[in-house]
Image (tube, rainbow, N blue to C red):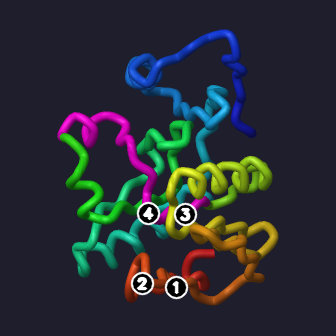
Amino acid sequence: MKGIVLNLDTVELTDEQFYRLCTKNQDWQFERNAKGELIIMPPVGGVSGNREADLITEVNIWNRQTKLGKVFSSSTIFRLPNGGDRSPDVAWVKLERWENLTEEEQEKFPPICPDFVIELRSRTDSLKALQDKMQEYLDSGLKLGWLINPQDREVEIYRSNQSMELVKYPATLSGEVILPGFVLDLTEII
């Protein structure tokens, strides 16, 4: 099932109103893209949910060892600087950047773009919609992002100020300088 997109051209939904909409409708998962469209996200199935949990676990284990930042699940909405309110499947924010937010900003939808994200394509996800989402992250300051596409056995690697790199089903992915020492073994996850 694909997400439902509601065009809100004639409706101005403030950040606070969007936050209240989400908190008053907790059985629904909402996102808002940079164009201001409201997206009602469907739940994921068992295979995708398990893969997502494995990805979060791997990033979190690395982060607990290094203590370099904060790890977030797909339930976290980030208010991106260049527009949009997005929930990556896995997100990581450098500790210094996180600590620069106020307590209220940390508690609500953090007004920050993660330094690193993973988007995992499920069987029902539109590849184009996920690619657009990755571009929104880049436009908002993302340093490194992986769009993992098990259906086509490939990974799109997004880096700030660089062209997207398409890698056919790599065995591992490196966190590069953004997540120093982190290596994801994809053979265990996908």
Q: Distance between the residues labelled 3 and 4?
A: 11 Å
For the residue marked with disc 1, what is the amino acid?
Ser
Which residue is denoted by mark 2 in the rendering? 182
Residue 129, given in percent of the width and then of the height, sits at 74, 47
Residue 115 visible in the shown view: yes
The disc labelled 2 sits on which kind of residue? Phe
Mark 1 residue crowding within 10 angstroms, few (<14) / some (14–19) / many (20+): few
106 up-or-down from 138: above or below: above
- The answer to whether residue 104 is magenta is yes
- In the rendered image, the quadrant that contains the N terminus is top right
Circle 1 residue: 174
Residue 96, placed above or below residue 164: above
Relative to the observer, which residue lies in front, 166 or 170? 166
Residue 135 screen position, x and y as percent: 66, 54
User: Circle 3 is placed at which residue position?
Assistant: 118
Cα gap from disc 3 to disc 2, whole angstroms: 14 Å
Residue 121 found in image quarter: bottom right
Q: Is residue 157 left or right of residue 103?
A: right
Residue 41 is drawn in which quadrant?
Answer: top right
CA–CA distance between discs 1 and 2? 6 Å
Name the residue rendered at 39%, 69% in the picture: 57
Where in the figure is residue 190, as x and y percent of width and height? 63, 75
Q: Which of 34 and 56 is in front in this view?
A: 34
Secondary element under disc 1, as helix, strand or loop, is strand
**Vertical placement of residue 154 versus 71, above or below:** below
Give the residue drawn at x 22%, y 34%.
104
Instruction: Quickly name the residue at label 4.
Output: 115
- Please state the extent of the stretch shown in magenta in the rendering: 103-119
Percent x, y of residue 64:
25, 74
Helix, strand or loop at mark 4: loop
As drawn, the residue found furthest toward the front would be 161
Q: Which of marks 4 and 1 is nearer the N terminus?
A: 4
